[in-house]
Every structure is written in C-alpha cells, then in structure tokens.
Amino acid sequence: MMDDLLQEMINPAPAQGDRPRRRRLWATIAIVSLSALGISTLTTSAIFSDDETSTSAITTGSIDLGIDDVNFSVPVDNMLPGASIVKPVHVSNDGSLLYQYGIVAQATNADPANLSTMLRMRIYDIAAADCTLANTETGSPNRISPAGNAWGISTSETNIVGDATIDAAPGNRELVAQTAEDLCVRVDFNSAADDAFQDSSTSLDLIFKARQVDFDPTDPGESNP
C-alpha cells in the first residue's frame, strides 16, 4: 500500500484535461509528417522534358606556311673575309588557322675547307625596306636569333629561332591566318679566314617549320582570331 502511494507521488497519473491535449499533439505531428511526405512526393514525381536537335558541320582548319627564296644580292662565290650580306625573307600564313613557326639552319660544305666554320648567321625582325647592314649591326634590339657572336654554322639541323616541335616554345613566331611578316637574314664571313678558305663553298639552308597552336579550352577561339 505504501509502495503504491509513493509511486503515485513520484509519477502521478495525468489529469483528465491533459489526455485530449496529448492526443491533439500527436495528431498534429502526424498531420505535419503526412503533409511533408505529400509535398515531397509531389515535387519529385513530376519530370518535365523538352528535346531539340541542332546540326552543325565541322570543318578542320589548315596550316599553310609560305616563304620566298633567299637569294643574296652579293654573289657568295665572291665573298671576301670580313664581308657581310643581308637579305629580307617574306613569311606568310596562307592557311585558315593561327600558327607558330620556328627556323632551323643547316650548312653543307662542298669541300674539306669547311667554310661554314668561318660563317655566322643572324636573323632580325625588320621590314624588307629596312633590311640593311647598318640596321643589323651587333646590339640591334630587333635580333630574334640567339644572342652571342660565335662563328660557325652547324652542318646538322639546328634551331636558331624558336622550336616548332614544342607548343609556345621560347622564340616561336606566331602568324594569324592570311597575314605575313618580313625577316632580315645576315651572313658574315670571318675576317680571320686564311688562304685555306680560298675557292671554297658551302650551302646554307633555312628551314621554316610551322605547327598549330595547341587547343586551349579557356580560349577556344585562339586559333582563329
């Protein structure tokens, strides 16, 4: 009997007026939960769609490098030690895409004298009308071939302006489609050449190599500005 009395004091039975309120509370929670379920179901069950088809032709661009022959104004077979000659070269982009190009030089000696060891080649970014000896002296700010004034032109292909095998390599020249530029080539004959180089000859080749600009997803129009 005493135990029952203590239990009622610790955990009294709910008053009669509280029971309906608790039922209303549980009923309210149930209604909110069902409403939330209904909203969720309504939101995710309806999917609207619309399809359209767009057709566009894809045409690849072209790389077309054009250069003029380098015919020096001074006959090479009459060059004297200490002489220098210059010649403009016209480079054009006859294609539809921006390209970058580099220049490779190579000498081919015709006799054991190895005349190429006594020659020096330098290239300048100078308009054809300004391609003169005076404008291509040592220290010209328009020089685009490597710095230095060492003598000798390699008998193997050697990069002297940029490197067209590498995208955006230092020194690579860029030409927009249907544009052109002039370069100025200077060749010097070492004044220290002795009699061993009399009546000797060599052929000098300038090889222009062009390549596309690698596609940049952040600048998709770069190749066709």
Image (cartoon, rainbow, N blue to C red):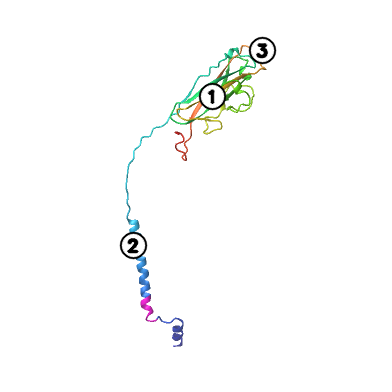
Q: Name the element at disc 2.
A: helix
Q: Determine which residue is flagged by label 2.
A: 38
Label located before the other in sequence (1 or 2): 2
In the displayed structure, 179 sits above or below 192; it is below
Q: Which residues are magenta?
A: 15-21
Mark number displayed over residue 195: 3
Label located before the other in sequence (3 or 2): 2
Q: Quadrant of the C terminus?
A: top left
Q: Please identify the residue farthest to the front as the structure is shown.
A: 129
Magenta span contains residue 79: no
In the displayed structure, 109 sits above or below 99; it is above
Which amino acid does the dot numbered 2 rest on? Gly
Residue at x 45% of width, y 83% of height: 7
Residue 29 rendering spot, x and y as whole percentages? 37, 69
Nearer to us of marks 1 and 2 is 1
Q: Residues within 10 Å of mark 3 (few under 14, many from 20)?
A: few
Tell me whether circle 1 and circle 2 mark residues in contact (CB < 8 Å). no
Q: Quadrant of residue 18?
A: bottom left
Which amino acid does the dot numbered 1 rest on? Ala
